[in-house]
């Protein structure tokens, strides 16, 4: 993360608030287990598995978990387990083959019309099922100058009408930095949509600052924010407030969830998730089949069960509340419906 200090200017309260909460997130498995009063064997396993992929979870997200319940669906997403060390056939380090599509440093061209800027390797939470658990985290270009080749590429290729800020999580960067990037992007006339893929409005809702709303709505583009929420219990009051702010700023907000064993592999959780999202004005967009990343096999739900769950959702909900059940296939030009 690049810090931009402008001497003589005091950062606003909201700025210091989310940065502080990110800095104070829980990284120590012992502390997480202590806060949630979890048994010793859980603590020891968490300590072992955190060596492969460190634990990271903001305190506000932990506060939504039920104490003394190792099976809590929110805890399951962040708690390191011994199962992560088990090898499983077909589960590999880079299941999506992202390494192969770099058109310029930090710029991924994989889909028609859309280019991804991998703006930050940092996340505010470490999701145990994520394929980024094996990613070379520090590879994103840093200062805005380092982004010039990517930005020139965007400016030159008029077939690209959408920029997706991705990562890691782009909202771990400061609004000052992102506003400068947005200003540069606004000089590219053929960009019609600016999309941000982020989990921060869910795990650290204070990140939805007025400054964020300012830069994201500053261009002539349609702003889109794709959040990542897997379970209705993630949507506590502060998160609901953050999502309402995005929607009220006239930003299109979509959710993608990942289908995860022990988290949301039941129709009640998925139905409640869709209904709560709709209440907030957020469209349930994708339900992802797990990427087969090494260390995440214990999260896999069979495609058969996935199809049954989505079929049941379709019986219970209006069509727009049923997410598209998709999987990412290496080499495919879009997500493949299941
Ligand atoms: C799938 C995916 C996209 C493209 O998304 P669409 O909504 O299918 O256009 C962009 N970024 C990431 C990280 C993705 O996984
Ligand atoms: S990229 Fe998204 S899913 Fe992966 S660890 Fe970061 S926040 Fe979680």
Image (tube, rainbow, N blue to C red):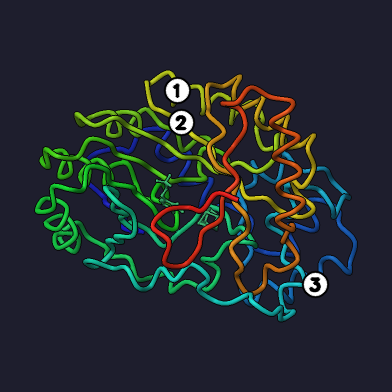
| Label disc, if present, on residue 149 of the rendered structure | none
Q: Residues within 10 Å of mark 2 (few under 14, many from 20)?
A: many
Left or right, 77 with respect to 267, comes to left
Which element type, helix, strand or loop, lies under badge 2?
Answer: strand
**Residue at the location (60% across, 41% down)?**
229
Place residue 211 in its image quadrant: top left
In x, y percent, where is residue 117? 30, 55
Specify few, some or many for label 3: CA neighbours under 10 Å numbering under 14, 14-19, or 20 or more: some
Tell me where residue 291 appears, x and y as whole percent: 58, 63
Q: Is residue 270 above or below residue 237?
A: below
Work out how far the residue at label 2 is from the one at label 3, CA to CA, in angstroms.
37 Å
Between the residue at mark 3 and the residue at mark 1, the CA separation in whole angstroms equals 40 Å
* Upstream in sequence: badge 2 or badge 3: 3
x 47%, y 71%: residue: 135
- Report if residue 307 is visible in the image: yes
Q: Tell me where residue 29 sits by quadrant.
A: bottom right
Per the image, the residue denoted by label 3 is 45
Residue 64: horizontal and vertical position, in percent?
72, 39
Q: Secondary structure at mark 1?
A: helix
Report which residue position mark 2 lands on: 253
In the rendered image, the vertical position of residue 250 relative to residue 109, given as above or below: above
Q: Callout 1: few (<14), some (14-19), or many (20+) C-alpha neighbours within 10 Å?
A: some
Q: In the rendered view, would you say 189 is above or below 28?
A: above
Q: Residue at x 69, y 31 (%)?
A: 314
Mark closest to the chain's N terminus, 2 or 1: 1
Q: Which residue is mark 1?
A: 247
Confirm whether residue 7 shows in the render.
Answer: no
Q: Residue at x 16, y 38 (%)?
A: 186
Q: Quadrant of residue 1?
A: bottom left
């Amino acid at each position: 993360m690049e810090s931009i200090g402008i001497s003589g200017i005091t950062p606003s309260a909201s700025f210091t608030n989310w940065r502080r909460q990110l800095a104070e997130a829980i990284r120590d498995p012992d502390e997480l287990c202590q806060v949630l009063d979890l048994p010793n064997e859980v603590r020891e396993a968490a300590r072992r598995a955190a060596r492969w992929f460190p634990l990271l979870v903001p305190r506000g997200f932990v506060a939504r978990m039920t104490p003394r319940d190792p099976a809590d669906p929110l805890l399951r997403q962040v708690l390191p387990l011994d199962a992560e060390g088990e090898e499983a056939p077909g589960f590999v380090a880079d299941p999506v083959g992202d390494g192969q599509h770099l058109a310029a440093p930090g710029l991924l061209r994989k889909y028609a019309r859309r280019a991804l800027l991998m703006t930050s390797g940092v996340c505010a939470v470490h999701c145990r099922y994520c394929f980024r658990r094996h990613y070379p985290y520090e590879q994103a270009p840093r200062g805005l100058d380092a982004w010039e080749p990517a930005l020139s590429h965007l400016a030159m290729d008029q077939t690209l009408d959408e920029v997706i800020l991705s990562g890691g999580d782009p909202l771990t960067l400061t609004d000052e930095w992102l506003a400068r990037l947005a200003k540069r992007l606004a000089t590219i006339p053929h960009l019609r949509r600016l999309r941000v893929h982020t989990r921060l409005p869910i795990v650290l809702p204070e990140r939805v600052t007025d400054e964020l709303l300012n830069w994201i709505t500053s261009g002539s583009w349609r702003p889109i924010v794709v959040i990542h929420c897997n379970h209705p219990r993630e949507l506590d009051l502060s998160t609901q407030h953050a999502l309402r702010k995005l929607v009220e700023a006239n930003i299109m907000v979509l959710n993608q969830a990942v289908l995860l064993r022990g988290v949301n592999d039941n129709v009640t959780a998925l139905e409640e998730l869709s209904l709560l999202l709709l209440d907030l004005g957020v469209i349930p967009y994708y339900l992802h089949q797990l990427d087969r990343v090494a260390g995440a096999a214990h999260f896999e739900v069979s495609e058969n069960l996935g199809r049954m769950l989505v079929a049941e959702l379709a019986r219970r909900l209006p069509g727009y509340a049923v997410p598209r059940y998709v999987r990412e296939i290496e080499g495919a030009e879009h997500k493949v419906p299941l």
